[in-house]
Amino acid sequence: MSTNCQAVPVPASATVPAGDAHRWKVLAVGVAANASFSAAANGMPTTAIWLRSGYHLSNTDLGVALGAMGLGVALSELPWGMATDRWGDRPVLLTGLLGTMLALLTLLLWITPADGSVPPLWALAAGLALVGVLGGSVNGASGRAVMRWFGAGERGFAMSIRQTAVPLGGGLGALILPSLASRHGFMPVFGALALVCGLSAFFTWRWMHEPDFSAEAATGPQNAPKGPLKDQATLPLKNRKVWRMVAAIGLLCVPQFAVLSFATVFLHDDGHLGLAGITSVMVVLQGGAMVMRIWSGRYTDRHANRPAWLRGAALVALATFVLLGMAAAGDAPGWVLMSAVVVAGIAVSAWHGVAYTELATEAGAANAGTALGMANTAVYVGLFLTPIAIPHLLAASNWPVVWWLAGLVALLARPLFPKA
């Protein structure tokens, strides 16, 4: 599929004036779509303890199950991004959200433990991988919409708000899904996730449209795009700077996924925490990540320092994972382990909006879907490999080594971000 095709113009009857009010509705749709999928992608790992017991899994099997959704997203992200650049945000989001809802309903109806029957690992992994394949649509499509509806002076802020959807969905998942899984099993878990995807699809159908660049829309906000975006940037797949940033984003997500996928197991097995303690840690972590993503987007918009900020974020992530490893090595009390997980998780989750804005700016708004698809492919390769690798690292070493190696991966991302 060629990447230099422009989105098919929306019929006149479907166009929406590019005014202040509607662009915020478009952003809200992007947040809702991403939060819906994040509730599954980042919320399911918070049920790891009950997933392990309910499906009779070993730690290695658990890693395969948790990584399956990431594999699905990794396989589909780039095709979804290219489809978005070709056909536009609205059809891609609607197709992906409705398909994800149906995949979750399939899990609910046929791949949940019931009446003493436990589905095999391959069925669970295949179902979660299908959720990932379909849910991968939300990332590139909603990011491209932000680039087209918001001007250069506030794209970092808007993209960071969109990126808060990831910890927002993960936080809501952490708040609700472990309780459902522990008390009622996985049928209501998959049902709740399917419901939020259906609601997001409705709001997408209602509000998500291509911007109207006609003369009648010339009274739109001063910093909104003026005229169709015909970027002359090098196509993302041929742009070496884009590829370096894609690699950096993928690497910096590895320690984040280490926390999101196995922090609950670490706190349960090593810190001897129960449901309330584990849930509170994951909710506070995701809430802090939301705040930091919004702040970082606004801060870097005002100071025009996205490259330097990203290189600094990699060093901060390294430092917090070193401290987390030290806490784990020192047989620290539960509250210290909880605090260390929260700090490390927030530090390694605060940079997303800034990085995605810098990446989309380099690629050009007309090619943003493809560039964001490339980045999310790298991200979800990490989501696939990280939970598979951790059980093997644990078998060969211990938790401090796991956290220190995660910090080292964050350091490897630093030189790949542009200097200025």
Image (cartoon, rainbow, N blue to C red):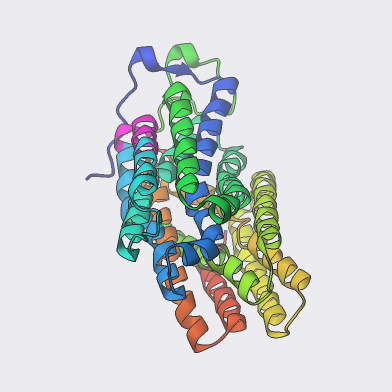
Residue 264 image point, x, y percent: 60, 66
Magenta span includes 252: no
- Is residue 87 located in the magenta-colored stretch of the structure? yes
Q: Is residue 420 left or right of residue 280?
A: left
Res. 234 in view = no
Q: Residue furthest left?
A: 1
Q: Is residue 374 above or below residue 325?
A: above
Name the residue at the front extreme. Answer: 115
Direction from residue 67 to residue 34 in the image, left or right: right
Towards the viewer: 198 or 319 = 198
Range of residues picked out in magenta: 86-97
Residue 137: give x, y in percent of width and height: 38, 43
The quarter in which the N terminus is drawn is top left
**Quarter of image, res 72:** bottom left
Q: Main secondary structure of the magenta part?
A: helix
Relative placement, left or right, of 369 versus 309 is left
Query: Which residue appears at 55% of the width and 15% of the height?
Result: 219
159 vs 389, nearest the viewer: 389
Q: Is residue 265 visible?
A: yes
Q: Position of residue 83 (x, y in %)?
A: 30, 40
Q: How many marks?
A: 0
Quadrant in which the C terminus appears: bottom right
Horizontally, is 2 left or right of 287 in the view? Answer: left
Residue visible at 77% across and 69% down?
Answer: 335
Towards the viewer: 8 or 292: 292
Q: Quick one: 354 or 395, which is closer to the camera?
A: 395
Spot occupied by residue 136 in the image (x, y as percentages of width and height): 39, 48
